[in-house]
Image (tube, grey):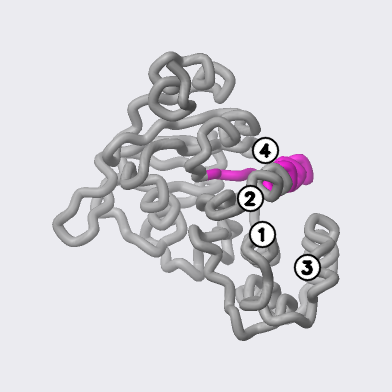
Amino acid sequence: MALLELQDIHTYYGNIHALKGISLAVNEGEIVTLIGSNGAGKSTTLRTISGLLTPRQGRITFNGRRIDTLQAHEIVKLGICQSPEGRRIFPRLTVLENLEMGAYTRPSRDSDYAADLDRVFGLFPRLKERVQQKGGTLSGGEQQMLAIGRALMGHPKVLLLDEPSMGLAPILVDQIFQIVQDINRQGTTILLVEQNALLALGIAHTGYVLQTGEIVLRDTAAKLQQDPTVQKAYLGMD
């Protein structure tokens, strides 16, 4: 049984049918990536899993429990945390206060809190150097680190990453993707939405291709990299 599974999910924005019956599975320990063009439904998929959007049809199960009827904060408590597109940190709060916000559903200073904070600072030493600095004064790369670190403070079993490379210089993109792999190696399952399909497929175990709200391809990431359709449409190859 998959750790996280979507079955025939239909999600709407008003009358706009954004997700048209998608099904996908994320197994424990995997990095699974969703690739597709802008407007394909990638971020909508993550928002539906997180409880920010409620599907009109279908079911989502996590660890054997149905979650598509739960509120967002209840889903976070179960162990699904998201680093959103555009980072959305709290610019007037310090780095530490932003990280503390990521742990808001947890009992105050539970036994794992200090360990999780140490884990974040181990993954992102720059954040430790700037622990009392306002989030809004950080560079774009540092803000992305903070957004991921904040999600990790929820002690997730599944980490949802939405466009972590957006707006970053290539050298920072490589650094972020290396850290994503480190997070996975430490035991966190990851569902990754990423515009840079080549990088995403390079670190993922499994990939899904979304097109106008429907999944049109699913395979191992290695096989998708060799698929002529994927190469032409998403990898910039003829």
Mark nearest the camera among 4 and 2 is: 2
Q: Where residue 48 appears, x then y in whole percent?
A: 38, 55
Which comes sooner in the sequence, label 3 or label 1?
3
What segment carries the magenta color? 176-192
Helix, strand or loop at label 2? It is loop
Of the pair 39 and 78, the residue shown nearer to us:
39
Q: CA distance from mark 2 to mark 1?
A: 8 Å
Which circle, 1 or 4, is nearer the viewer? 1
Q: What x and y, as percent, mark residue 35?
A: 45, 36
Give the residue drawn at x 55%, y 29%: 206
User: Is residue 203 depicted above or below 136 in this figure?
Assistant: above
Q: Quadrant of the N terminus?
A: top right
Q: Which residue is mark 1?
A: 141
First of labels 3, 4 by sequence position: 4
User: Is residue 187 a member of the stretch shown in magenta?
Assistant: yes
Q: Quadrant of residue 190?
A: top right
Answer yes or no: do the residues labelled 4 and 2 have beta carbons within 8 Å?
no
Q: Tell me the number on the disc at residue 127.
A: 3
